[in-house]
């Protein structure tokens, strides 16, 4: 064998060895990225949403109570059907069309209806997606009441100086709570190159969510001028809350909200590679525990005689305080929705009617005057159809449930 051939084989062996080492070193990242790329596929979405721990970094939250807040069973009939915009659907057909995996309805703190679908059961800890934003709002209210955040009109850069010079420079905490930061951000889940999907890849690859937020440099409009739903706004609120409390969000949320709630199971948060919680959508809990949070809000922040979230914050955060929606939502069903501090309001909301929502069909709907809470988890791949039509149709069904419960 010639010297050139021997030399070439040695070089090839070294190249192969380096490739093997690099592949082994990055295998977990590649696995996560491959799983994330199939996160929403029809054959995997239900299983993925029922257990996200294999796809993302995560941190367990030991918040299970030895004595969970009781939710006594008191079964009630659900409406047989409902009509919205001349379209009549049966209750069962609506559940199927919306690909529900779980539904819990509370009336006066009792379980009026509970069901699980698609091979899931009550023990699954399900992804909240953007319902997590409303949990963060509740924790924020505690920090405000405790004087850790004296003014909502302070610039976010007062708490997070690393945002100076970014698209968030000049935005106040109130602006960001209202989804009116003015930051330019593409939230299109169906666009591979959108900002929201770039953020998802940051999360999957273990990069820094703080770094991602700090790297946003473009503004779409002046802060406070219009409401545009921008999920990264909630991450910035998490940065503010961490700075104000000196604690990671999972620790502070567990201390102030989740442990006092009397949950039946531990929760967990998805995190980036630096252990920073994915506060804008990474909370995972049982559906009954989501309903317990709704019950807390239905009772003005009080549970079992204990004030967990200040009542004035509940009222303030669920009031329609945000500016008018952005130009892209004008004339659409999305544009008929109101917004507070990380809580949504239905079209023509009655006093004390509000909801949390997450992509693919996650809901916590609250009707305070009727003391009704509806918690739903789903895997609805059509959730974005027609600029909010699905959302307002679901709200119509929730209202029909409330009306039905009142007659029983």
Image (spheres, rainbow, N blue to C red):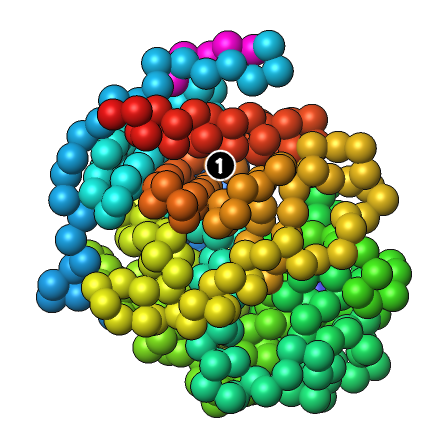
* Residue 86, position as x, y percentages in the image: 60, 10
Let me know if residue 212 appears in the view: no
Most frequent secondary structure within the magenta stretch: strand
Q: Hey, which residue is sitting farthest left in the picture?
A: 66
Q: Answer above or below: position of 398 versus 51.
A: above
What residue do we see at 30% from left, 37% from top? 105
Viewer-closest of 388 and 196: 388
Q: Quadrant of the N terminus?
A: bottom right
Instruction: State the residue position of label 1.
Output: 361
Left or right: 38 in relation to 93: right
Residue 15, how many percent across, how many down? 61, 64
Disc 1 secondary structure class: loop
Q: Quadrant of residue 8?
A: bottom right
The residue depicted at 85 percent of the width and 44 percent of the height is: 327
Tell me: 405 left or right of 179.
left
What residue is shown at x 23% (from left), y 67% (from top)? 305
> Callout 1: few (<14), some (14-19), or many (20+) C-alpha neighbours within 10 Å?
many
The structure residue drawn at horizontal position 44% and vertical position 50%, both measured from the top left corner, is 128
């Amino acid at each position: 064998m010639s010297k050139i051939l021997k030399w070439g084989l040695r070089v090839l062996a070294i190249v192969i060895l380096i490739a093997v080492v690099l592949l082994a070193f990055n295998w977990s990242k590649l696995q996560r990225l491959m799983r994330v790329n199939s996160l929403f596929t029809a054959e995997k979405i239900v299983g993925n949403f029922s257990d996200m721990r294999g796809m993302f970094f995560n941190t367990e939250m030991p918040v299970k109570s030895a004595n969970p807040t009781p939710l006594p069973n008191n079964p009630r009939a659900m409406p047989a059907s409902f009509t919205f915009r001349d379209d009549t659907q049966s209750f069962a057909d609506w559940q199927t069309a919306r690909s529900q995996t779980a539904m819990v309805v509370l009336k006066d703190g009792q379980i009026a209806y509970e069901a699980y679908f698609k091979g899931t059961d009550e023990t699954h800890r399900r992804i909240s997606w953007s319902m997590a934003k409303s949990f963060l709002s509740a924790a924020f209210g505690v920090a405000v009441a405790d004087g850790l955040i004296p003014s909502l009109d302070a610039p976010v850069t007062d708490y997070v100086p690393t945002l100076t010079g970014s698209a968030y420079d000049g935005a106040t905490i109130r602006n960001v709570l209202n989804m009116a930061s003015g930051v330019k951000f593409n939230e299109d889940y169906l666009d591979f190159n959108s900002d929201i999907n770039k953020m998802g890849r940051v999360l999957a690859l273990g990069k820094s969510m703080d770094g991602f937020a700090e790297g946003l440099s473009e503004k779409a409009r002046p802060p406070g001028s219009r409401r545009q739903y921008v999920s990264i706004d909630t991450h910035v609120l998490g940065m503010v809350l961490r700075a104000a409390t000196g604690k990671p969000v999972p620790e502070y949320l567990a201390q102030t909200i989740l442990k006092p709630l009397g949950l039946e199971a531990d929760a967990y948060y998805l995190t980036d590679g630096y252990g920073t919680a994915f506060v804008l959508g990474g909370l995972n809990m049982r559906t009954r525990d989501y309903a317990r949070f709704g019950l807390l809000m239905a009772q003005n922040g009080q549970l079992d005689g204990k004030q967990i979230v200040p009542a004035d914050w509940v009222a303030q955060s669920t009031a329609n305080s945000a500016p008018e929606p952005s130009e892209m939502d004008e004339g659409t069903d999305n544009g008929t929705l109101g917004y507070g501090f990380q809580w949504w309001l239905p079209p023509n909301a009655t006093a004390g009617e509000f909801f949390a929502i997450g992509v693919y069909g996650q809901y916590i709907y609250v009707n305070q005057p009727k003391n009704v809470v509806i918690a739903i988890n789903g895997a609805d791949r059509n959730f974005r159809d027609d600029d909010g039509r699905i959302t307002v149709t679901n709200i119509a069904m929730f209202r029909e449930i409330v009306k039905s419960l009142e007659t029983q």
